[in-house]
Image (cartoon, rainbow, N blue to C red):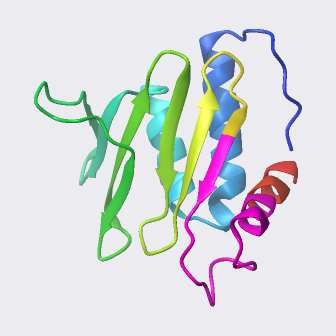
Amino acid sequence: MEKVTTKQLPDEEVKNQVIKSLIKLRRKFGSAYELSQAVKKFGLFNGVVEYCEDGYDFRPFYDDETPYVGAYAEEGWAFPTFGCINDGKFWMCKLGFGIHKVNLTFNNKTGAIVKIVPDNTNSQLCWDNNTIRGRIAEIRALLEE
């Protein structure tokens, strides 16, 4: 896994660290690349980013909307939408548009991933392992590459 530092990094470095991690995960989840592009444009956002024909648009969560972490795309690939939460300490996101997903929590001061929560749906294609522990190990291995 990436070297974890406790030193607070400047916001731009934290953003770049998150983008770097997301790009490493795109081999397993193509949505990781799409989310990395949204982070590149909007930073570690708190709200919803939707891809439209002219690029990504951001909106904060509505006052009457419960903040959520989510990933969705029409037909499983078109017009991706991401709901992400930034609570000031951690940035939380989800990768995966289909039945297989992984929730990630990043430290806002270092950009390091502090929590990985994969789905527990049986897998024939996405995951090499059908245990939560094994799936977390798969994500960590991709991050180490």
Depth check: 19 or 116 in front?
116
Please provide the residue range marked out in magenta: 115-138
| Residue shown at the point (58%, 84%) measured from the top left | 122
Q: Is residue 127 above or below residue 112?
A: below
Q: Is residue 15 above or below residue 141?
A: above
Which image quadrant for residue 3? Answer: top right
Q: Is residue 122 magenta?
A: yes
Q: Is residue 36 magenta?
A: no
| Residue shown at the point (65%, 49%) measured from the top left | 116
Q: Position of residue 25 (x, y in %)?
A: 67, 56
| Residue shown at the point (69%, 19%) measured from the top left | 13
Q: Is residue 58 above or below residue 141?
A: above
| Left or right: residue 79 compared with residue 18 | left
Q: Position of residue 59 (x, y in %)?
A: 23, 31
| Residue shown at the point (24%, 27%) measured from the top left | 60
- Specify the farthest residue to the bottom: 124
- Specify the farthest residue to the left: 64
Evaluate whether residue 104 shows in this view.
yes
Question: Which quadrant: the C terminus?
Answer: bottom right
| Left or right: residue 32 compared with residue 128 | left
Q: Position of residue 28 (x, y in %)?
A: 65, 67
Which image quadrant for residue 9? Answer: top right
Q: Position of residue 96 (x, y in %)?
A: 49, 63
Q: Is residue 65 above or below residue 108?
A: below
Q: What is the total number of numbered labels drawn onto the structure image?
A: 0
Question: Which quadrant: the N terminus?
Answer: top right
| Left or right: residue 21 compared with residue 105 | right
Evaluate whether residue 56 shows in this view.
no
